[in-house]
Image (spheres, rainbow, N blue to C red):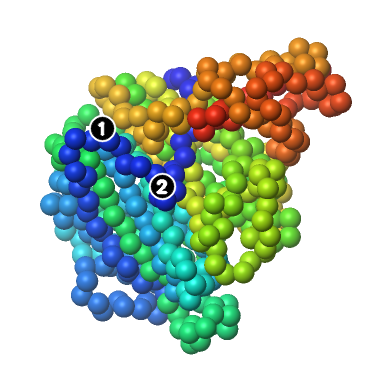
C-alpha cells in the first residue's frame, strides 16, 4: 500500500468556473428551496406534504432517486448547494448524505441504514432581512459519480439522497425582525451538474462505507472523554475497521472532519494537527483551517463575535479551523493498490483538550476502489496540485525549493501554533532565534497550491 496522500479542498461556489467542455452543462435539481425547521422540535413540520420528500426529522430530509435520475450521471460531477436565511441567525453545520436502502422500501431508519456523507458546510451568521440572504457552496466530486453508477449497488439498493441541516430559531425569535414565534430556520437548494454525457453502469467499482458522523444533538463523535468517541479515555484517538470485498488496483479513502466546541478554550478556536493511519501506517497529516475568512464576511449579515472587526491574514491563520459560510474541506487519501480483506483507519489528534468535556470532531469516511484501472482524479483542478517541494534544515538555516514560485512560507511549532510568515522568494531563512525542536513549514505558491513539511531544528 502506498503512503501517498493528496489534500483536496471543496471550493466556494462564487467565482469558481466550470470545466471547459464542447457541450452545454447538464443540471439536475434534487431539492428546491426546501424549508428546514427547529432541529430540537420532535414534531416534524411539513410531514404531510406530497412533494416526494421523506422527512425523518426537521433537520434531515431524503428523496428516493428514480432510475431516470440515477441514469443521468456522467464521468464528472459538481454539486451546488444554496442555503437561504430564515429564522436562525447563527452558524450551523449541514451536510449531504447518500443512504443505501433495500429496494422497494417506502421508508427507512436513518440510524441503522448504511449511509455516507458526500459533503459538509457551515452556515454564516445571517439576518434574513439583509442582503445577501443566501450563501452558495460548490463541490467538485467526480469520483462520487461512480457510486451512482455502481452496478452491484444499483442491483441491491435504492439510493436516497439526504439533505441535513440543523438549526434552531430561539435567538432569532427575539433578535430578528419578523421571526417572533417562527420555527423555520433555513431553506436549501441542491443541484447536480455534469458536462459529460450519461455513462453506463460499471462492475469495476468497489465501495466500502467506513463511518458517518453523528448529528450534533447526539454527540459522541471523535473526542477524548467518551467511550463512544475514543479508543482510550484521555486520548483523542479512534479506530474504525472495514472490509474490502475485492482486490483493488487503485483505492482511495474520502475523509471529512471538522472541529467543534464553542466554549471558552473550545476546539473550534484552536488548530490541532490530525494524523491518519491505515493499517498502522501514517497516510495523512493535516492542520485544519489557516485560510482567511474575510471573503465570507459578506454573507455574515448578522452581527457576531467572529466578524466583529476586519482581521488580517495572520489572525485567520492562527484561529480559523473553518469559516462561517464556507464548505468544509473534503480530503482524499490515495492508497494505490489495496488487497481484499480486513483493514483499519485510525485518526488521532494528540493535542486536543476538549475543555470541560465539550465539543467533538465529527468524522465521515468511505473507501472507493477500482478492480481495474484508476479512480478519477477527484476534486483537483490542475492548479491545485501540491507542488513538488524540498524543505531542509542545516544548522539554523531553513531552506526550501519548489517546482513553482513560492509566495509565502508560514512557520508553526509542533503543536500547530502560528509563529510567523516569510517572503517565499528568499529561498532561505535563519532560525537562529528559535528553540530546538520540530517545526511545521507551510509553503503557499503563487498559483494557490500549497504544501506542508516537517523539519527538525537541533
Image position of 147 with respect to 414: above or below: below
Q: Estimate how packed mark 1 is, as few (under 14), some (14 to 19) or many (20 or more) residues with alpha carbons within 10 Å.
A: many
The image shows residue 5 at horizontal and vertical percentages of 48, 27
Q: Nearer the viewer's eye, disc 1 or disc 2?
A: 2
Residue at horizontal 42 percent and vertical 77 percent from the top = 184
Residue at horizontal 80 percent and vertical 13 percent from the top = 395
- Asked whether the viewer can see residue 420, the reply is yes
Image position of 390 with respect to 62: above or below: above
> 344 left or right of 437?
left
Residue at horizontal 53 percent and vertical 17 percent from the top = 403
Asked which quadrant contains residue 397, the reply is: top right
Image position of 119 with respect to 217: above or below: above
The image shows residue 428 at horizontal and vertical percentages of 72, 18
> 427 left or right of 218?
right
- Which residue, given by chain and number where applicable, does mark 1 sit on? 205
- Asked whether the viewer can see residue 201, the reply is no
Q: Residue 15 — which label? A: 2
Kindly report the distance in space between the C-alpha atoms of the residues bearing marks 1 and 2. 33 Å
> 323 left or right of 342?
right
State which quarter of the image contains the N terminus.
top left
**In front: 131, or 91?**
131
The image shows residue 135 at horizontal and vertical percentages of 44, 60
**In front: 351, or 37?**
37
Residue at horizontal 26 percent and vertical 25 percent from the top = 371
Q: Secondary structure at mark 2?
A: loop
State which quarter of the image contains the C terminus.
top right
Amino acid at each position: 500500500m502506498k503512503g501517498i496522500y493528496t489534500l483536496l479542498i471543496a471550493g466556494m461556489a462564487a467565482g469558481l468556473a466550470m470545466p471547459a467542455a464542447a457541450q452545454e452543462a447538464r443540471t439536475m435539481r434534487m431539492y428546491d428551496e426546501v424549508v428546514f425547521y427547529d432541529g430540537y422540535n420532535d414534531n416534524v413540520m411539513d410531514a404531510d406534504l406530497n412533494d416526494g420528500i421523506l422527512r425523518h426529522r426537521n433537520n434531515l430530509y431524503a428523496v428516493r432517486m428514480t432510475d431516470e435520475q440515477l441514469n443521468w450521471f456522467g464521468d464528472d460531477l459538481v454539486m451546488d448547494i444554496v442555503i437561504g436565511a430564515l429564522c436562525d441567525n447563527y452558524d450551523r453545520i449541514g451536510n449531504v448524505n447518500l443512504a443505501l436502502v433495500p429496494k422497494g422500501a417506502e421508508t427507512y431508519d436513518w440510524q441503522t441504514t448504511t449511509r455516507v456523507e458526500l459533503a459538509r458546510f457551515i452556515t454564516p451568521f445571517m439576518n434574513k432581512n439583509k442582503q445577501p440572504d443566501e450563501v452558495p457552496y460548490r463541490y467538485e466530486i467526480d469520483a462520487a459519480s461512480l457510486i451512482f453508477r455502481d452496478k452491484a449497488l444499483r442491483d441491491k439498493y435504492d439510493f436516497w439522497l439526504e439533505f441535513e441541516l440543523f438549526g434552531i430559531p430561539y435567538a432569532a425569535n427575539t433578535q430578528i425582525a419578523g421571526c417572533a414565534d417562527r420555527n423555520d430556520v433555513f431553506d436549501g437548494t441542491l443541484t447536480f451538474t455534469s458536462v459529460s454525457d450519461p455513462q453506463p453502469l460499471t462492475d469495476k467499482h468497489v465501495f466500502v462505507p467506513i463511518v458517518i458522523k453523528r448529528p450534533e444533538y447526539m454527540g459522541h463523535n471523535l473526542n477524548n472523554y467518551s467511550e463512544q468517541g475514543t479508543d482510550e479515555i484521555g486520548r483523542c484517538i479512534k479506530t474504525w475497521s472495514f472490509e474490502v470485498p475485492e482486490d483493488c488496483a487503485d483505492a482511495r479513502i474520502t475523509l471529512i472532519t471538522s472541529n467543534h466546541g464553542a466554549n471558552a478554550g473550545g476546539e473550534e478556536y484552536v488548530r490541532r494537527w490530525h494524523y491518519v493511519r491505515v493499517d498502522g501506517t501514517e497516510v495523512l497529516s493535516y492542520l485544519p483551517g489557516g485560510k482567511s475568512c474575510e471573503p465570507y464576511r459578506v454573507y455574515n449579515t448578522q452581527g457576531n463575535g467572529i466578524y466583529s472587526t476586519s482581521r488580517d491574514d495572520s489572525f485567520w491563520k492562527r484561529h480559523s479551523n473553518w469559516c462561517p459560510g464556507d464548505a468544509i474541506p473534503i480530503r482524499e487519501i490515495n492508497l494505490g493498490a489495496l488487497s481484499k480483506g480486513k483493514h483499519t483507519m485510525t485518526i488521532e489528534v494528540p493535542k486536543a483538550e476538549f475543555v470541560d468535556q465539550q465539543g467533538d470532531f465529527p468524522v465521515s469516511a468511505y473507501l472507493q476502489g477500482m478492480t481495474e484501472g484508476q479512480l478519477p482524479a477527484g476534486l483537483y483542478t490542475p492548479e491545485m496540485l501540491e507542488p513538488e517541494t524540498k524543505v531542509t534544515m542545516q544548522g539554523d538555516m531553513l531552506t526550501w525549493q519548489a517546482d513553482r514560485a513560492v509566495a509565502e512560507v508560514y512557520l508553526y511549532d509542533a503543536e500547530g501554533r502560528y509563529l510567523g510568515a516569510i517572503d517565499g522568494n528568499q529561498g532561505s531563512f535563519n532560525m537562529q532565534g528559535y528553540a530546538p525542536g520540530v517545526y511545521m513549514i507551510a509553503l503557499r505558491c503563487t498559483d494557490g497550491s500549497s504544501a506542508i513539511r516537517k523539519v527538525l531544528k537541533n
